[in-house]
Amino acid sequence: MFGSSLVRAYSATGTKRFPRSFEELPCVPGGLPYLGSFMKLGANPHGWKQPMENLKILQEKYDPQGNGLLRMSSRLMNPKGDGRILAFFDPKDIEIAYKHEGKHPSRGGALAPLVKWRLSRPDIFGETKGVLMEEGEKWHQLRGLVQQDLMRPKSAMQHLDQIQGICQDFLEMLEREMSSSKDGKTVRGLLPHLFNFGFEGSAAIALDKRMGVFRENPHPEVMKQLREIEIVTEMSIDLMMGIPWYQISPFISPKYRKFVRHFDSFAYFAHIDEVKAQIKEKIDKDQLKKSDGISMLEKLILKNGLNSNVPFVMALDMILAGIDTTGASCAFILYHLATNPEKQDILRKELLQHDPHITESSLTKMRYLKACIKESARLTPIVAFHLRLIQEEFTVKGFHVPVDTLALWSSMLSGRNPKYVENPTAFKPERWLRGNETKVDPFVSLPFGHGPRMCVGKRFADIEMQLLTAKFFRSYGWEWIGQRPISTIWQFVNIPDQSLDFRLHQL
Ligand code: HEM
């Protein structure tokens, strides 16, 4: 009965030490019952558009000594741990927290509306909620089934030519946009096109199918589906952060019913039965063999069998998870390079040392390109918060953190904090190059998360961002003509708060 407190009170050498209790941590007080003080992240002045900025204000107010730890509460966000939430600000403490994420890391119940929808659609999801939403041993098994095919560096490299083809189509679309502008050089409102790039790239990798979004006349059905996803994404923060009436009954939550309608439309559009029939035919004719040339879906079917839902749900998740994430990341890269012409020149010099057709070997040598992408993710990470439901108690800065505490941190805050990054507001890709003496702690900026539950699409997202950036800056000089500085809006991921407008100079 006294086991865990005794372990805490005595160190391994038997000398007495007293971690202070969780309740003694600096804390954001108040809040409504059930919703708790966590909801102050969505209050004025920044609202849910910039909850990270609100968190910074709350830390300055309630942790004036700058301990780097701030306790909050919300039973909505963490029903399992009595509403305990702890925000971390110091990269050293973030590293410690990851060490206690357990064998089956969990991001808690933040995606509850999506889980509810999946459970109500057994015809699509069957025995699995997908790697994004499964928990515990089921997540572990599922991740094991897809890990190798998705995370091996070679897997992504097999798609180099396919993605370069998509980049080429994007460039042709840009030419059309420019030639219809007054000065023949301007493109405005590029963000939706970048989302389309994420969609086209993910669909090509997952299904080996080109959707043709950059054609002069894209298929209206495909564009309708992209709109469905846009609606779902726009609604998701409202649903995730509001009182979950839909858990009592979907009938009392018109918002949830709308969310489901649009999600259904997208999921059924994937035409799973049709794709299944085509692949079955290939298998029957003995035409489907494990090789580099087959789609990710086909690889997963060969491993899991045609009757398993796992390959189809993974393909659906790849498409869903690759739209806004890759699109918004590319948007910020373009912005930072367009507003830093001297960095743009250094990048171009590197790109021009290689053949325009990028190969695995030339990509490996493009170190400045990768540093630009890392630096953009440090300044404007698209994921607002990283979450872990702590599975092993630990002590940090002398305070006890119990099991089932929901730990959260924001790369936006650590990445811009002068305590951890020298001259943090400057776009300085050089800081990520080997040999640079001003080292940045790796836990300062974690665009893809960390550990066994980190982003499973990282390899694909990396090559998509690298190829698009390389093609764009080799072909044009990019000049930003929007307002400065750009800021972010949290819309499931952080996206730019204004239209992406550029003037392009042909090289
Ligand atoms: C630049 C683009 C992307 C960024 C910045 C990004 C970032 C992230 C982050 C931060 C996580 C949470 C990791 C954690 O909890 O430690 C995540 C999870 C995930 N991402 Fe990505 N992502 C991107 C693109 C993609 C793409 C293209 C796919 C398609 C395969 C994808 C699929 C997933 C999946 C399935 C998970 C859940 C993994 C799990 O729970 O085991 N992501 N992503």
Image (cartoon, grey):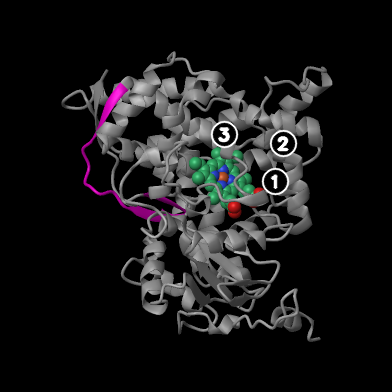
Magenta stretch in the rendered image: 476-495
| 488 or 342, nearer to the observer | 342
Q: Return the residue at label 2.
A: 148
Q: Residues within 10 Å of mark 3 (few under 14, many from 20)?
A: many
| Residue 350 within the magenta-colored segment of the rendering | no
Give the spatial CA distance, label 1 vs label 3: 25 Å
Which amino acid is tagged 3? Phe
Q: Secondary structure at mark 3?
A: helix
Q: Is residue 131 above or below residue 472?
A: below
Instruction: Report if the CB atoms under discs 3 and 2 are less than 8 Å apart.
Output: no
Q: Is mark 3 within 8 Å of ligand 1?
A: yes
Residue 322 in sight in this render: yes
Foreground disc of the pair 1, 3: 3
Instruction: Report if the CB atoms under discs 1 and 3 are less than 8 Å apart.
Output: no
Res. 124 mark: 1
For the N terminus, the image quarter is bottom right
Which percent across, then down, holds residue 154? 65, 27
Which amino acid is tagged 2? Gln
Q: Residues within 10 Å of mark 2 (few under 14, many from 20)?
A: few
Relative side of 254 to 188, left or right: right
Res. 460 mark: 3
Which percent across, then down, holds residue 390? 65, 67
